[in-house]
Image (cartoon, rainbow, N blue to C red):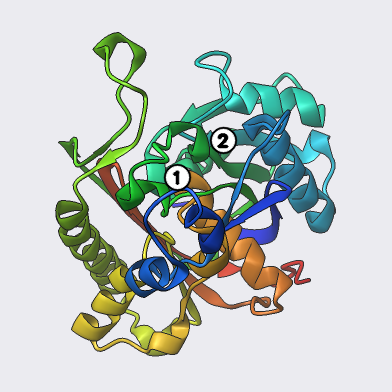
Amino acid sequence: MESLELIATGGAVPKHPVHNNDLAKIMDTSDEWIFSRTGIHSRYFCEGDETVTALAAEAARQAMERAGITSDEVGCLVAATCSGDYATPAESCLVQRALGLPDDIPVTDVNAACSGFIYAAEVARGFLQESEKPYALVVGAEQISRFLDMTDRSTAVLFGDGAGAAVFRRTPASLYHHVLGAAGGLEINVPGAASGKPEKVSMDGKAVFRFATRAMRRSIESLMEQSGKTFDDVDWVICHQANSRIIDHVVRRMNAPAEKFFEDMDRFGNTSGASVPLALNDMNEQHLLSPGQTLLLIGFGSGLTWGGLMLKCAPDFRAE
């Protein structure tokens, strides 16, 4: 089985930060109430002419520049999003045009919501099996703010906009394991136009919490079993940044080392498909990633979907 190894990361967020205190001006909430329940202090919302495409292209361009690769070396582009700028063309096609990528490579979108980046990486790995080019560009980008009901504090306080990107390289020799799953359900949903309902996020919070903790634990256990590894062999666990309580619960139940579970939802909120790659880039810019590290990437979200990857930072990983 051909593997993927992480070469470089990129990230982008809108210009406008929205602190919990800003939300307290328009709804019955407070910074203490939100943070104590979610671990979130702030997030970013798109304004004016800011788009998913612009964020995705900025993150992808940064990842390519850090990787030191040209557009001709990219064998595929896969974008994870559930909030692209158009129903069609695909967000990946718009990013392809923005970056000037060649027209002889596959590009496609994946909508697995908060698990999207994990799914997208696996799709990219499949594309690379048939490509003469060694690199895959995988992007997660969202503008969830346009789906928010700002009178509903149970959902409006959770989400943010942003984009993250990663350059992966095909390799036959590196550690690599994956797990993907789905169980159809409407516990988290945004109704489509034909439903006649407002296109706003709806969520059964208690059901989502139960699902997320099970899915996260299931994914980690599966990857450990496949690889024969333990937490002692893993440098970082990068989970979908939905809610600090979810991560804390799993850490306790698994008796896992909390210091290996990265969190940055305090600054970005839940950015759905952008969450995992944005966290990877945040870690890189904090100088937490380095060549040869073993990473667990874990996603879970609407669908209901879940997934995980165990992979390495490449020996020539471009650390910031």
Residue type for callout 1: Glu
In this picture, residue 30 sits left or right of residue 125? left
Q: Is mark 2 in CB contact (under 8 Å) with mark 1?
A: no
Q: What x and y, as percent, mark residue 116?
A: 43, 43
Q: What x and y, as percent, mark residue 212?
A: 24, 59
Asked whether residue 220 is in view, the answer is yes
Using the image, tell me which numbered label, if any, was put on residue 78: 2
Using the image, tell me which numbered label, if any, was put on residue 122: 1
Along the viewing direction, whichever of 79 and 125 lies nearer the viewer: 79
Q: What x and y, as percent, mark residue 164?
A: 62, 50
Separation (CA) of disc 2 from disc 1 = 10 Å
Residue type for callout 2: Val
Along the viewing direction, whichever of 263 and 25 lies nearer the viewer: 25
Q: Is residue 104 above or below residue 314?
A: above
Residue at (35, 13) in percent of width and height:
193
- Total count of labels: 2
Q: Quarter-wise, where is residue 172 in the image?
A: bottom right
Asked whether residue 4 is in view, the answer is no
Q: Earlier in the sequence, mark 2 or mark 1?
A: 2
Q: Secondary structure at mark 1?
A: helix
Q: Is residue 260 above or below residue 108?
A: below
Q: What is the crowding at mark 2: few (fewer than 14 residues within 10 Å), some, or many (at least 20)?
A: many
In this picture, residue 115 sits left or right of residue 280? left
Q: Quarter-wise, where is residue 17 in the image?
A: bottom right
Residue at (81, 36) in percent of width and height:
71
In this picture, residue 41 sits left or right of residue 315? left
Residue at (81, 34) in percent of width and height:
72
Q: What x and y, as percent, mark residue 113?
A: 39, 40
Q: Secondary structure at mark 2?
A: strand
Q: What is the crowding at mark 1: few (fewer than 14 residues within 10 Å), some, or many (at least 20)?
A: many
